[in-house]
Amino acid sequence: MARILLALMCLSGWSYSTCLQYHYVADQKTWTEAQTYCRQTYADLATIGNKEQNDQLLDTITSAGQSSEVWMGLYSTIDWRWSDGFSGVGANYSNWRSDQPDFNAAHDLCVAVRNVWSDELCSSKRHVVCYNGSQLDPNVFFVNSSETWPVAQKYCRENYVDLVTVTNIKVVKKIYSETGGSQVWIGLHRPPNFFWSDGSNFTFSNWDFVHNNLNSMKVICAVTSSTMWGKWKFLSCEEKLPFVCYSMPHAYRLQLKITSGNSALDLNDPAVKKDLLKKLEERLKSKEERKVTLKWRNQQDGKVFKKLHTVVDSNGPEDCNGDYV
Ligand SMILES: *[C@@H]1O[C@H](CO)[C@@H](O)[C@H](O)[C@H]1NC(C)=O
Ligand SMILES: *[C@@H]1O[C@H](CO)[C@@H](O)[C@H](O)[C@H]1NC(C)=O
Ligand SMILES: *[C@@H]1O[C@H](CO)[C@@H](O)[C@H](O)[C@H]1NC(C)=O
Ligand SMILES: *[C@@H]1O[C@H](CO)[C@@H](O)[C@H](O)[C@H]1NC(C)=O
């Protein structure tokens, strides 16, 4: 790859920190409205990356005198799938118990069946029903030993086709007549799909041990409160609640002018941008003790860089007199 010559980087007010600042907003909004407000006014809805930040957010709502639930930036999408990947007619057949799926403590991602269905902890042990033959009219096989869902899946795949897929009431009845009503794993499960509004990785959680009734919702949004001791749970994103935004008080938007000796070099090439960011971070690392994170910011045309001059003065730009790194 072409070598990049960094002629000069002009920085003003260079200062930064990894600390977030939380802002309680009393207006009652749906989760999406709250997100829009936070993005316009601060950085985004609150992201919580560790216990210290969770305590800090709890302090923020407590000092604001807010004791009921507030939105934060976490949401989850509900995407049920069959273990064998079946997605044809009947793939969305269901037979939930009236109080299910309840996503207890935000942990239950696998489905067990007696005569009606409930979502359960995938690591808990249940008897198993495997199938072979067709999905719409399967041969079902009861496995008389208690296994976790992943072990049950592996066993069924090795010995039959897969965990049973249930597409109609006939299959429900077939299963019941084999199992005599003991609770069994079927092939239905879903990925956890936890996301922060600002795109941060989901690494820390602080679930409340309560039911999070999913009904037929496709997306659910997280709340916390001081009466829950800062624990989290999910509600319908359409509820209107106060919320917490965050800002990065010491994050700065910097403009960068780059002089390249190679006029054919496309600075908007993802590989070039990545390389450039790495070089800048290395330079900062050698100058600063604290951690610095750099990100490119797209302009309105969706690109990071705009070409200013085609012909570059070999002495570099001279209209820059700030500190530079
Ligand atoms: C199942 O999916 C079909 C489309 O594949 C849709 O028309 C139908 O409404 C869905 N049924 C339920 C109960 O969600
Ligand atoms: C299903 O499995 C049973 C028991 O292993 C076997 O006898 C039968 O031939 C299989 N049927 C199909 C359609 O694979
Ligand atoms: C499962 O096995 C136990 C003993 O291991 C037996 O008592 C029980 O009847 C079996 N259940 C079925 C449905 O075969
Ligand atoms: C987020 O997680 C992915 C996958 O584990 C990892 O590759 C990536 O580096 C993480 N990003 C940050 C900012 O930690």
Image: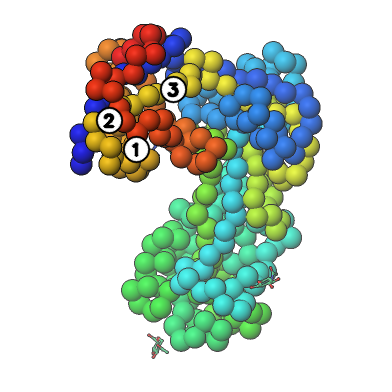
Q: Quadrant of residue 321?
A: top left
Q: Earlier in the sequence, mark 3 or mark 1?
A: 3
Asked whether mark 3 lies closer than 8 Å to ligand 4, one says: no
- Quick check: which quadrant has ligand 4? top left
Asked whether mark 2 lies closer than 8 Å to ligand 4, one says: no
- Quadrant for the C terminus in the image: top left
Residue 152 at x, y percent in the picture: 42, 66
Residue 142 at x, y percent in the picture: 48, 76
Which residue: 41% across, 60% down?
Answer: 150
Which scheme is used to colour this image of the protein? rainbow
Instruction: Characterize the local packing of mark 2: few (<14), some (14-19) or many (20 or more) Cα atoms within 10 angstroms.
Output: many
- Relative to 207, 228 lies left or right: right
The amino acid sitting under disc 1 is Leu
The amino acid sitting under disc 3 is Gln
Which residue: 65% across, 47% down?
Answer: 220
Residue 53 at x, y percent in the picture: 53, 22
Q: Is residue 218 above or below residue 293?
A: below
- Quadrant for the N terminus in the image: top left
Report how far apart the C-alphas of labels 3 and 1 lie in the structure: 14 Å
Which residue: 37% across, 24% down?
Answer: 257
- Relative to 25, 292 lies left or right: left
Pick whichever, 152 or 85, lies toward us: 85
Q: Earlier in the sequence, mark 2 or mark 3?
A: 3
**Residue that carries the numbered disc 1 in the rendered image:** 267
Q: Quadrant of residue 233?
A: top right
Mark 2 and 1 residues: CB-CB less than 8 Å, in contact?
yes
**Residue that carries the numbered disc 3 in the rendered image:** 255
**Residue that carries the numbered disc 2 in the rendered image:** 260
- Disc 3 element: loop
